[in-house]
Every structure is written in C-alpha cells, then in structure tokens.
C-alpha cells in the first residue's frame, strides 16, 4: 500500500509495487514524482526525513538534511525569510533517495534501477500535469511578493498570473535535471555536471552556497528515538528534528485513560492540547546534536513525563508557551509484501521555499536556513556547516516488533499536534485511518492568516465542545471544517494478519492505493476468484485515478499467497 498527497505520486509508487519493487523503491518513485507535481511544498532543492522498518527487527532513520554554507554572509541582525540569502542550506532530498536505494539493495533485495524509479517524475515534468487547487492557491497568495524572487515568475507564472487549477503545467528544465540524475546517478546533483550548473545558478542568484557545500551534503543514517504507548513502540527521528516533541506528547497522554472518554470530546481535545503545551516547553532546546548536547533520555524519562502529566489541570488551560514557526511539507508512506515499511516527509520549508529558481535547472531551492536564529547565544544559532532545528517529523509505530502504523503530516508547528490527535484516535479509540483523518483537529498558535496565539479548532467539533473548552480558559478561534490549517496527513495501518488499511487526508487531494499481492504471507487465504477480483478491481481503479484524479480514497486490501 502507498499513500501521498497527490494521486499521480501515489500511482507512481503503486506502479513500482505492482512491478515487484519494495517499499523503499516505491517511496523513491513517490518522492521524485511529488517533487514535480507538488512544487509549492517540496522539490529537488529541499530535504527529507525517513523512518524505515521491517519485520526482521531492523529500524532506522535517514536524515536527509542539508547543512549551512561554510562561508556565511553578515545578515545584519536577522536572517531573511525569502530570497537568495535564505537559500543558505544545501539540499539533501536527492541524496536521501540515493541512500534509500542503496539500503534497499543491501537489506531488502531491491533490484530496480534508480533511473526507472524517476521515470514518472520525468514524464510529468516533461508532458505536464493538471495544476492542483493547492498549487493555484499558494501561487495566488504569494503573487505580489513572488515578483522579486529570482527566476520564479518566469517558471511558475509564465503569463503573469497564477495558472488556474486543472490547467496543464510543464517544467521542461526540471525534466532535464531529473533526466541527468537518472542517467548519471543521484550524486551528480552534488558533484557532476548538474551539480556544477546548480552551484553556478546559486552563486548567480546571490546565495552563499558553493560547490564545496554541495559536495559535503550527505544523508545520515541514525537510530530513531522511541517511546512505548499502549502496546505500540512509536518511532520518531532524533534531533535536530522535533520528533522528540511528538513522543513527549504521547508519553504525557499515556498517563490518562483516554479510552474512557469520547473521541473528539472536550475532554479528549483538552488533554491533547495541554499535553502539547507541556511537550513544547522542551522543544526550544532542540538543535543540531553535533553542536549542542541533546538530553534526549531526560526529556523522555518517565519522571519528566509523569511530572508534565501531573501539571495538567483537567478544568483549566495553560497559556500557549511557544513561538510560531511556519513551514509546509508533504508526507508519503509505503509498505510492501514482505512488511518493509517507510514513512517520509519531504519539504522546501515554507510554501515555495526561498523563491529562488536555480539558473536554468528548474530547481526551486529551500529556505530551511531561515529556521536558524541570528542570536549567537541561541541553541539554534546559525553557524557554518550546522543543521537547523527541523520540523519534519514522520512516524512509524511497531507492534510486537513489526511495522503496524505509518503516519505523518504537513504543518510545521502543527505536526506534533496533528499526530497527537491521529494517534489517540487510531490507538485509544481504535478508529480506522479514514475516520481518524476526518475527525476535527486543532492548531495552537499563530498562522499565516491569524496572528493570534489562539487555539484554532475546526468548527465541526460542535458548539458544545467549543463552549466547554472556552469555559476551561482556551482562547478559541473557529476555522472551517476540514481546514488545510489542521495539516494534511496520511496513515497506513497494518494488522497482525497482514491487512493494510490506508488513507490520505480529506483536507487535500491525496490518495491511498492498495496492491493485491499473491506472494504475501498471511494467515487468511481468500479464494483464487477473490484474489483475481481484487487484481481486476485495482486495474480499473488505476485507470480511474489516472483520468479523474479523485481527492481521496481509503483503501483496504488483504494479502493472499499463491494456491
């Protein structure tokens, strides 16, 4: 099964699984395709964070995080949010694809050539794809300020305005860059002919990044951090990501009997909100562990989490303690016939990243360096070669040592908040992915459209819930039901019999596709006719996806083995 925010990217991953590929190979296909068809939230000029696990007990994390330029300019007291001086960290997403491909070959028997995994991405860039409503909205929203971004308007607004949703959008230069990567290998992005063109384009735009910075960019493979929660081992990426924050929230909630409450009730929401506030008190200390010691064990210690849980007043809200960080990203996931499972977030930080299109490569560069602080005393102070605090926070849950939940969301500050709601609905209230994703959610803090540090709550939570939360002291700001402000998440759940259930968020245009595989092991064994029916249905389903691009789909399929 695969899930992503865009039907074409999901289909790219599903095609790899149908061809006998594994979850890592499918994820590379999804990641490269989504970099083309979702250019406002991710791309080749960004980063990615991966959590990988299988049934043998292997579990690991790929941190595809670029580092700050070695030669930094004088920012004059503040780091720009956009433009060339915000393009100050290298991009590691392409190298993360390389690392995933190597890991696939070493540990999962992967045999599909890297160039094949990029085929759909190249085709969509070359031949074009329908502009999503999301892309059209964010172009229109940033149109005024985007006029000054180097090379941006010529690529994304060729007629001087945001293209309408549904219109065909081509990226010929990006197609050429992807073709060079497919031909010469992913390291060509950093060290080959393409890398030379990228370095020259960055320099011409005014970025401090050099060819040496590109060559030094490498994915790091590290152990994930983990926490036990009601029979699951929840995995998260370590610092400099905010994965610790999600685990801390769940560690605090573990000390409450949520199952005795009602999903979506004022009690459920209040506890999740208050757990978020306590966990975020430590979040400000997260930084690059190469530079700043990270007391991970202390932050996730039982004593620390018990104290945080004990400080929650069931009848009264704590003031919101955290500053606002913007950021957008995409989540995608895949699980294969052998139980190999991958949970990924890929991003250029803000919508449209730095706004800098690198020369004639068609590559939009990230502005992740804007997450640094210009205060030299801050734990996240900018320094040459340092990695910034990172919001990317994909998750993977193990049950009895085997992958059981793949989950993640777009949303910067909102990622741990959305995941708290999803995980409590999935685990405490035993909801299936589609139901958990559709439930009302919240977002604490400021947003691009509301500068108040209030509790944004989707209005389908109901009047009674709003009234009860207000009585407990929450400063509420209603937002529309199924609002994109509440994140765009995806979930794949795998039960102990091999049944996979997946969905992507109804707040976006995502899709989950399940693949019937007669080679999978399962305790349950449908008839040959049943197996044939599922294959036929999937064949029709794939054509329907290709032509009609549905907004979302929940998929549920049972594995079978050959008779």
Image: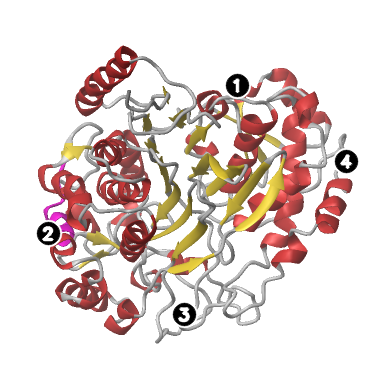
Q: Would residue 318 appear left or right of 408 to someone viewing this image? A: right
Q: Nearer the viewer, mark 2 or mark 1?
A: 2
Nearest to N terminus: mark 3 or mark 4 = 3
Dot 3 falls on a residue whose secondary structure is loop
Looking at the image, do the residues carrying marks 3 and 2 touch, with CB atoms under 8 Å apart? no
Task: Please rate how many residues cluster around mark 3, counting C-alpha atoms within 10 Å: few if below 14, some from 14 to 19, many from 20.
Answer: few
Q: Gap between marks 2 and 1, in whole Å?
A: 46 Å
Q: For the residue carrying disc 1, how many other residues have a C-alpha within 10 Å: few (<14), some (14-19), or many (20+)?
A: some
Out of 214 and 21, give the one closest to the viewer.
21
Give me the C-alpha separation between circle 4 and circle 2: 57 Å
Q: Which mark is residue 460?
A: 1
Residue 515 has which mark? none
> From this viewpoint, is residue 332 visible?
yes
Instruction: Classify residue 104 by image quadrant.
Output: bottom left
Residue range in magenta is: 169-179
Residue 276 visible to the viewer: no
Residue placed under numbered mark 4 in the picture: 313
Q: Which residue is mark 2?
A: 176
Instruction: Work out how far the residue at label 1 is from the one at label 4, CA to CA, in angstroms.
Output: 25 Å
Q: Nearer the viewer, mark 4 or mark 2?
A: 2
Along the viewing direction, whichever of 269 and 119 lies nearer the viewer = 119
Q: Quadrant of residue 93?
A: bottom left
Q: CA distance from mark 3 to mark 4?
A: 43 Å
State which mark lies toward you, 3 or 1: 1
Name the secondary structure under disc 4.
Answer: loop
The mark nearer the N terminus, 2 or 1, is 2
Residue drawn at 55 percent across, 23 percent down: 435
The percent coordinates of residue 484 (x first, y second) are: 48, 36
């Amino acid at each position: 099964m695969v899930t992503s925010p865009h039907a074409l990217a999901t289909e790219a991953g599903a095609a790899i699984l149908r061809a006998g590929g594994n979850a890592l190979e499918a994820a590379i296909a999804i990641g490269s395709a989504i970099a083309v068809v979702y250019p406002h939230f991710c791309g080749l000029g960004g980063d990615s964070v991966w959590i990988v696990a299988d049934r043998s007990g292997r579990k690991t994390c790929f941190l595809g995080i670029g580092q700050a330029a070695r030669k930094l300019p004088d920012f004059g007291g503040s780091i720009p949010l956009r433009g060339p001086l915000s393009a100050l960290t290298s991009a590691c997403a392409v190298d993360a694809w390389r690392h995933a491909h190597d890991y696939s070959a070493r540990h999962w028997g992967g045999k599909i050539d890297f160039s094949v995994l990029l085929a759909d991405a190249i085709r969509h860039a070359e031949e074009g794809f329908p502009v999503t409503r999301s892309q059209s909205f964010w172009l229109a929203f940033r149109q005024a300020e985007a006029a000054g971004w180097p090379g941006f308007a010529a690529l994304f607004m060729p007629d001087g305005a945001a293209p309408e949703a549904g219109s065909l959008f081509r990226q010929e230069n990006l197609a050429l860059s992807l073709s060079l990567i497919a031909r010469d290998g992913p390291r060509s992005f950093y060290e080959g002919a393409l890398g030379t063109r990228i370095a020259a384009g960055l320099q011409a735009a005014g970025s401090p990044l050099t060819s040496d910075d590109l060559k030094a960019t490498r994915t790091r493979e590290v152990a994930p951090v983990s926490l036990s929660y009601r029979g699951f081992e929840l995995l998260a990426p370590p610092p400099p990501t905010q994965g610790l924050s999600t685990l801390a929230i769940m560690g605090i909630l573990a000390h409450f009997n949520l199952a005795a409450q009602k999903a979506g009730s004022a009690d459920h929401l209040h506890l999740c909100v208050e757990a978020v506030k306590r966990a975020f008190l430590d979040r400000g200390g997260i930084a690059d562990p190469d530079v700043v010691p990270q007391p991970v064990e202390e932050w996730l210690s039982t004593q620390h989490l018990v104290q945080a849980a004990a400080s929650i007043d069931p009848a009264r809200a704590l003031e919101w303690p955290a500053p606002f960080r913007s950021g957008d990203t995409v989540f995608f996931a895949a699980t294969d016939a052998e139980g190999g499972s991958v949970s990924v977030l890929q991003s250029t930080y803000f919508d449209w990243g730095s706004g800098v299109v690198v020369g004639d490569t068609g590559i939009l560069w990230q502005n992740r360096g804007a997450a640094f602080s210009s205060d030299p005393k801050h734990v996240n102070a900018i320094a040459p070669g340092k990695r910034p605090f990172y919001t990317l926070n994909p998750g993977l849950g193990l049950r009895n040592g085997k992958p059981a939940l793949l989950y993640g969301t777009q949303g910067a500050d909102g990622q741990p908040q959305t995941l708290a709601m999803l995980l409590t609905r999935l685990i405490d209230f035993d909801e299936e992915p589609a139901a958990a994703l559709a439930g009302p959610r919240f977002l604490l803090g400021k947003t691009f459209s509301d500068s108040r540090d209030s509790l944004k709550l989707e209005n389908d939570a109901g009047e009674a819930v709003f009234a009860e939360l207000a009585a407990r002291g929450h400063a509420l700001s209603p937002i529309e039901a199924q609002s994109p402000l509440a994140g765009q998440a995806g979930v794949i759940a795998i039960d102990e019999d091999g049944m996979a259930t997946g969905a992507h968020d109804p707040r976006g245009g995502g899709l989950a596709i399940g693949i019937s595989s007669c080679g999978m092991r399962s305790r349950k064994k449908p008839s040959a006719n049943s197996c044939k029916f599922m294959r036929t249905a999937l064949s029709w389903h794939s054509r329907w996806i290709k032509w009609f691009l549905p907004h979302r789909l929940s998929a549920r399929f049972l594995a079978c083995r050959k008779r």
